[in-house]
Amino acid sequence: MSQSIYATTPKPRPIRAPKLHHATFMTMEIDPMVKFYEAVCGLQPIFYSENAAWMVNDEANHRIALLRIPGTVPPVDKPHSAGIHHTAFEYPDFDSWLDNYVRLRDQDILPAFNMDHGMTMSMYYTDPDGNGIEIQVDNFHDWGKSSEWMWASREFAEDQLGPQFDPDKLVAAREAGMDHDEIHRRAYAGEFRPAVEVPNPSFPDRWAEKIAANPELLRGVPFPLAAEA
């Protein structure tokens, strides 16, 4: 029997793959970003200065890094520019996930849009710089089962986004006695759609409003003054 070509061909990946550790964002204002990630994702600063912050919400030394680098300027048409679309954080159970929405809603922090993707129910927020943040919960309660559904189901092959939903309708459904599985089933069937859906869907562009409020942002993050001789 001939030897498999695949078995003797170097694979285009490491033998032991590294795990995703953190994401780093360039920003022009550290404080609003720290405040947002602490409120929405429970991240606390490990190190926090005028020009940088490293934040964590688990056992790692950091999960989000924020850098205010001299020369950084506002993005142009950020929601439609190539690059990272969003980062995601996952709750281990439906009630914690929905409770987080209620907590943020009561602070007037609302998602830009919400979708039941089939494998997850996801709420998408926008940070002060216009970066997308997904807060999700696994609908199968098991990554193995949700992974199998993604590659094997006809539903996901035909539609990778799924229907949008109104999170307040989920809150009402839970108060009426429905559990996660029933709420997901109904949301995925389109029963909890919002009155107005977000087209595409896409994140809002924060920068026109930010620049209108502070035109000095157009100058970019200033370089430090040269030390006097």
Image (cartoon, rainbow, N blue to C red):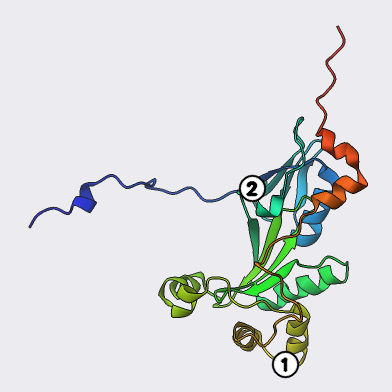
Question: Which residue type does callout 2 highlight?
Answer: Ala
Question: Which residue type does callout 1 highlight?
Answer: Gly
Of residues 84 and 40, the one nearer the viewer is 84
Say the numbered circle drawn on residue 177. Answer: 1
Percent x, y of residue 61: 66, 45
**Disc 2 to disc 1, C-alpha distance:** 38 Å
Of residues 81 and 103, the one nearer the viewer is 81
Percent x, y of residue 122: 65, 70
* CB-based contact (under 8 Å), mark 2 and mark 1: no
**Picture quarter containing residue 134?**
bottom right
Q: Is residue 158 above or below residue 216?
A: below
* Dot 1 crowding, Cα within 10 Å, few <14, some 14–19, many 20+: few
**Picture quarter containing residue 223?**
top right
* Dot 2 crowding, Cα within 10 Å, few <14, some 14–19, many 20+: few
Residue of label 2: 23
Percent x, y of residue 153: 44, 78
Residue at x-position 64% and y-position 60%: 88
On screen, residue 41 versus residue 107, left or right, reads left
Q: Quadrant of the N terminus?
A: bottom left
Q: Is residue 18 above or below residue 110?
A: above
